[in-house]
Image: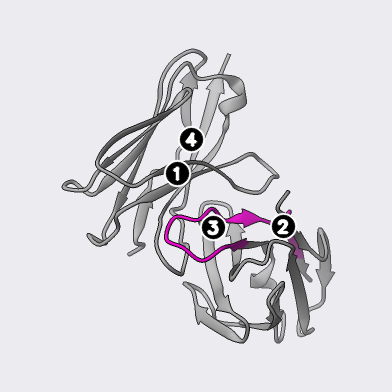
Amino acid sequence: DVKVTQSSRYLVKRTGEKVFLECVQDMDHENMFWYRQDPGLGLRLIYFSYDVKMKEKGDIPEGYSVSREKKERFSLILESASTNQTSMYLCASSSTGWDTEAFFGQGTRLTVV
Amino acid sequence: QKEVEQNSGPLSVPEGAIASLNCTYSDRGSQSFFWYRQYSGKSPELIMFIYSNGDKEDGRFTAQLNKASQYVSLLIRDSQPSDSATYLCAPAGWGKLQFGAGTQVVVTP
């Protein structure tokens, strides 16, 4: 079974904190994605990585950065958390190809207070 | 403007009826599409992939792609309460995977 694991299911952080969301996949996938999901706004792509140390901005990269030092791990970093970053964050991975299925982690519900 | 547009719903469907969901897209280069289903509180999962004009059937689900009119649709026949979920479409391709906002379907007994 493909497994995409996010480090936390729920997280509460204070405004201004640096926050790390970790995602690990065990299927040797080249592609990894970070999304945030908010009611009425759907699933919005924050960053995408297609290889180690390679990344592309998605629709809403402002306030976020990412790190991919190893193929199986993709980290999302909130440099200085703000209340408008309170959201559900979803990580996904897929293999290289135009028709490959993306597999999602269980999500991290982040609350910034 | 988002690359993919979906009516957010909710789409209320009586049990046993056909649910019809639409997704329009702006990039004429998009050749194929995914449909994902997301239950409340869960992560999305792939239910259909369509890459050619016309229909593709898988059980009670039928995906339809019309490249000339730039829309892709999903039909759910004999809708069941277990079909109540949000359905997301996304163009396939190399690289980024970007979804429409999703359509919430509510099947009422």
The reply to whether dot 4 and dot 3 touch (C-beta < 8 Å) is: no
Specify whether residue A104 is painted magenta. yes
- Do circles 2 and 3 both sit on a common chain? yes
Q: Residues within 10 Å of mark 1 (few under 14, many from 20)?
A: some
The reply to whether dot 4 and dot 2 touch (C-beta < 8 Å) is: no
Q: Which mark is residue B10?
A: 4
* Numbered disc 3: secondary structure: strand
Rounded to the nearest angstrom, the CA distance separating label 4 from label 2 is 23 Å
Residue A24 is situated, as x and y percent measured from the top left of the image, at 75, 67
Which stretch is magenta?
Answer: A93-110
Q: Which residue is mark 2?
A: A107
Rounded to the nearest angstrom, the CA distance separating label 3 from label 1 is 12 Å
- Chain containing the residue with disc 2: A
Q: Name the front one of labels 4 and 3.
A: 3
Amino acid type of the residue that numbered disc 4 sits on in the rendered structure: Pro
Residue positioned 50% across, 20% down in the render: B79
Q: Which residue is mark 1?
A: B8
Rounded to the nearest angstrom, the CA distance separating label 2 from label 3 is 12 Å
Amino acid type of the residue that numbered disc 3 sits on in the rendered structure: Leu
A53 in relation to A28, above or below: below
Residue B59 is situated, as x and y percent measured from the top left of the image, at 48, 23
B41 in relation to B106, above or below: below
Q: Which mark is residue A43?
A: 3
- Chain containing the residue with disc 1: B
Q: Is residue B68 left or right of residue B25?
A: left
Residue B99 is situated, as x and y percent measured from the top left of the image, at 46, 56
Rounded to the nearest angstrom, the CA distance separating label 4 from label 3 is 17 Å
* Numbered disc 2: secondary structure: loop
Q: Name the front one of labels 4 and 2.
A: 2
A58 in relation to B4, above or below: below
Specify whether residue B20 is painted magenta. no
- Chain containing the residue with disc 3: A
